[in-house]
Image (cartoon, rainbow, N blue to C red):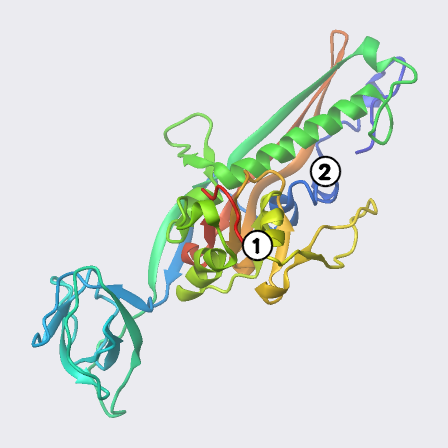
Amino acid sequence: MPSTFAQGIELLQDFAGQIRNEIHAVSMNWFVNRCPLVSRLPRIPVESTTFAVVSRVARPRTLKLGAAVAATDTSMTFLDATYLMVGDVLELVSGERVEVTGEVNVAANSVTIRRAAEGTVASTGALNDTVRLVGNSRTGGEVNQLGVAMKPAISYQYCQTWQHPVQISGSLQAAIGFASSARGGTPLDQARMDGLQNLMDDMETTSYYGRGEDPALVARPKQKGLKTLIVTNNTTAPTNSGTYRATDFIRDTMERCRTNGGNPDILLLSSNFMTGLATWGHAVQRITAGTNVFGVPINVFEAPFLGGITLVEAPLLRPFTAVALTSSEIRLRVKRNEFWSPRGVRGDAFEGDLIAEGAIELANESHHAWVEGITAFSA
C-alpha cells in the first residue's frame, strides 16, 4: 500500500488524493499462504447483502429401506424413493437384485418390484438397510414414463462487512528510525499492514466457521461459512477418530463427495493434518505453483495416494480439520473488495479504516466435504 501521509505539515492538497483505495490485489498476494481460501478463490461481484444459492442434487446411488422387507414382498418402502424410475435395478445388502416395475408412490415412498432379478435369490431386508441403485433398464420403446430431474434446493447467504480501524498519533508518526516490517517504514504503514492482516484473518475464519445471521433480523449480518454450508458430507465425529487412517480419510471426503456427483480436486488441510499424511506413509510433496508478486512461493502440495488432488495448508483451520472442495463450485461473492478508506486527521491522530464486504458462495453442497473431530492419526 502506498503511503499517502507525509511527515510535517498537512495541507489541503495533501488530502485531495485521499479517495478510497482498493487494495485487494495487495492482500490477495501478501496473504496467499496464510489465508488461502479468500485470497485464491475467484471473485464475482454481488449487488445485494442477501443472495440466493441454487444447488442441484443428482440421483443418489444409495437408498435406505423405510421398512423391513420379506422374501415374498412385491413392493418396497424407502425413506426417500422420489428419484426412482420404472426399470431401475436395485441391489439389497444380501446381494439380491430387484427391478422397479411401477411408478413411485410419492405419498408412501414405495415402489412395486420384481424380485430375484438377474439370476439372484429373493431374500429379506431390514429397516435402514442400505440399498444400492445399480442403474436403469428399459425396452427402448416405452412411452409416458415419468422422468427424474436433479432436485434444485435454494439457500440464502449473507454478505458480511469486516472493518478494522487504524489510528496513529502524530507524535508516533513523526518518530524517526521506527522499526517496521512494512514497505514504507512509517508507523502508519506498519499499523495498516497489521490491520490488513487482522482483516484478512477475519475474512478467512468467518468463511470457515460463520453460522450466518440474516440482515433482516440483525444490524450486523454474518455470512455462513463452509462448516455450515456443507450439510450432506459434514463429519464432526468420524469413525475411528482416535486411530484415524488414510482409508477413513478417503471414506469421509473423496468417497462421499463422488457418491453425490461431486469431483473434489482441492483439499484444505489444517497445519497438523500434514503430520497425519506422514503418519500414513504419504508425506506430501511440494509442487511448483509459482510465486506471488512479492516473490514469495505459493504453497501447494500433492500426496501420491490422492491421485493428483491439490493439497493446500490452511493455517487458520482448527487442528485435525480437512475440507474437500469441488473448485468449480465455490467462489467469493464481493460487494466491496478490500480497501483502505482514509478519514484524515482528527486532533493529533491519523485515522482510516480497512474494510471489505462479501461472502462465500458454495454451489451443490453435497459435492464438498468437511471433516473434524479427529483426535489422533494412525498408520
Marked residue nearer the N-terminal end (1 or 2): 2
Among all residues in the image, which is located at the extreme right? 177
User: In the image, is 215 to the left or to the right of 73?
Assistant: right
Check the image and name the residue furthest to the left: 72
Above or below, 133 against 330 in this view is below
* Disc assigned to residue 23: 2
Q: Quadrant of the C terminus?
A: bottom right
Q: Secondary structure at mark 1?
A: strand
Which residue, given by chain and number where applicable, does mark 1 sit on? 267
Q: Is residue 51 visible?
A: no
Could you say which quadrant of the image residue 35 lies in? top right
x, y percent for residue 110: 14, 67
- In the image, taking residue 8 as reference, residue 194 lies left or right, namely left
| Residue found at x 47% / y 49% | 243
| Numbered tag placed on residue 180 in the rendering | none
Q: Amino acid at mark 1?
A: Leu
